Structure formats: C-alpha cells, structure tokens
Amino acid sequence: MLSAAGLLLLALALGDSGRAEVRPVEAVGAVPLDADAPSRVPPRDAALQRALQHAVHRVALDELPDFDPETGEEALAVALGKDPSEFATRYRIREDRGERPALFTDDPEVESEYVVVVEVHVDVERVRERLAEAGLLLMPSGDGRRYRVRVVIERVESYAAYMAVRTLLEELGLRSVLPAEMERGRAVLEVDGDRSPDQLMNGLLEAAPSNLRLVPLSIDATTLTLRVRFLGAPASPDPGVWPGAPPD
C-alpha cells in the first residue's frame, strides 16, 4: 500500500488525474435473416448490437495477448456482460448496408443477413477494470500472480525523466517493460510482472534517487498514472526536452 505521504500526494493530485483512454474501433455487425422466424428485434438494431459487441471484444483481446478466444470465449462473454454499450463512449453507423447475401454468417442454410459498419469509441479503462474484476488480467504464473500494468507518465518534461522511470521499473526485476505510446507531454509503458499497480508505485518510490520526484496521480486495478520531474540536474549530460512539455 502507499505510505501516508504517498496517499497525501495522491489525494492532492486526483483533481488532475488525466484523461480516460478511449480507442476508436471500426466493426462490422451482421445478423442472419430468417423469413420463417423473424426476430422481435429490428434487424438494424440487432446488427448494431453485434457490431458494438465485436468492437468491445477486440479491445479486450488486445489487452489479453496470451488469451485464447476459442477456449476462453465463454469467460470473456461473462466478464464483459450482455450490454456492450456500457463500454462505448459514443458510436455512429458509418454504413447501413441493409439486407445482403450472407457473407459473415457461418450457417450455410442462411441466405441473407443485415449488415452495418459502425465506428465505436471504446472506453479502454472500463474494459480493463471489468477484465480485472473477472480475474482475466491476473493470471497465475510459476512465481506468484502475474500483472499486466499500464504505467502512464503525464506531463513529461524531458526524455531523461521518462528514461528514469523506465530504468527504475526495469531494476524492479519485472518480466518486461515496453514502451506503448509516446505523444506530446505523455508516455505509456506496458509492464508485465508480479507487482500490482500500487506495489509498483511503492517500489518506484523506494528506488527513486533523492533528486527524482515521483507523484502518483491515480491508481486502479490495471493502470498507474504518475508525474515525474528532477529536482536538480539529471544524471544525463543532455536530458533533452520532451515535445509539448509544460513549463514549471
């Protein structure tokens, strides 16, 4: 758990806890049409629901690289529930293709289907939280639990500050620490190891040198968001300036 000082810093920083991660996904929704047994749900609505489900499941599978969708399809369906719209911040139908000859349906007896193409903006954090609650992000390994954690560094001021966090993580003995995203003033590292997000934060605080200040902004089941800055000159002779870094 965080120390008293860490909890105080976290409480002060929650007002600037960063933005939610939203991932745009284009998905196709198709439902078979059966003239002899028409569905009570309009085909367009059913196809839209199927597209939303496909988009959410694709984001979930991106978060579970070792997951076998064939053997674990039922567990994934249970974890994400029956209403995919709860994970979508917004969506729009890009193409309403209507009734077409069957292409996406596996059943050879189905001759036609209703098809839509939908752009879905999926709340990635909400998907991760649901997967974590279902135990799919915490998988047993030979030496204890296995955690996949996103370490988000907000308002990065220099490349040296980013590398300081990455080096500290690597020194914690994790399985892997890989860069996932880099943009103006922000960096994301994907961490695979045996420490939960709060344990990672404690490890970083204990290992950080005296001239490096780490401020936790938010911690949840799968993500650690923090800010880092040097109190004095960093060890690197040329720290560099991170693009878009805010002035102090």
Image (cartoon, grey):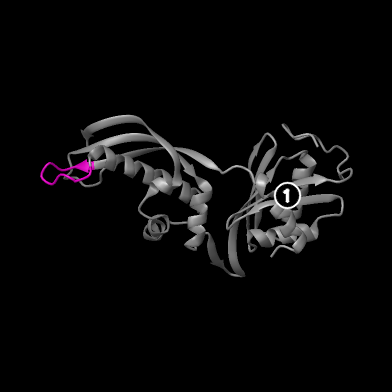
- What residue appears at the point 47 percent right and 62 percent down from the top-left corner? 134
Residue 52, by quadrant, is top left
The residue that label 1 is drawn on is 166
Residue 209 rendering spot, x and y as whole percentages: 84, 54
Query: In the image shown, does 163 or 17 lie closer to the viewer?
Result: 17
The span shown in magenta is: 32-41
Q: Main secondary structure of the magenta part?
A: loop
Q: Secondary structure at mark 1?
A: helix
Question: Is 115 left or right of 214, judged from the image as shown?
Answer: left
Q: Residues within 10 Å of mark 1 (few under 14, many from 20)?
A: some
Q: Is residue 39 magenta?
A: yes
Quarter of the picture containing the N terminus is bottom right
Report the amino acid beneath label 1: Arg
- What residue appears at the point 50 percent right and 61 percent down from the top-left corner? 133
- Seen as rendered, the residue at the extreme bottom is 143
- Seen as rendered, the residue at the extreme left is 36
Whether residue 39 is visible: yes
Quarter of the picture containing the C terminus is top right
Question: Is 234 left or right of 205, judged from the image as shown?
Answer: right
Residue 214 rendering spot, x and y as whole percentages: 77, 51
Q: Is residue 37 magenta?
A: yes
* In the rendered image, the vertical position of residue 46 relative to residue 98, given as above or below: below
Whether residue 104 is visible: no
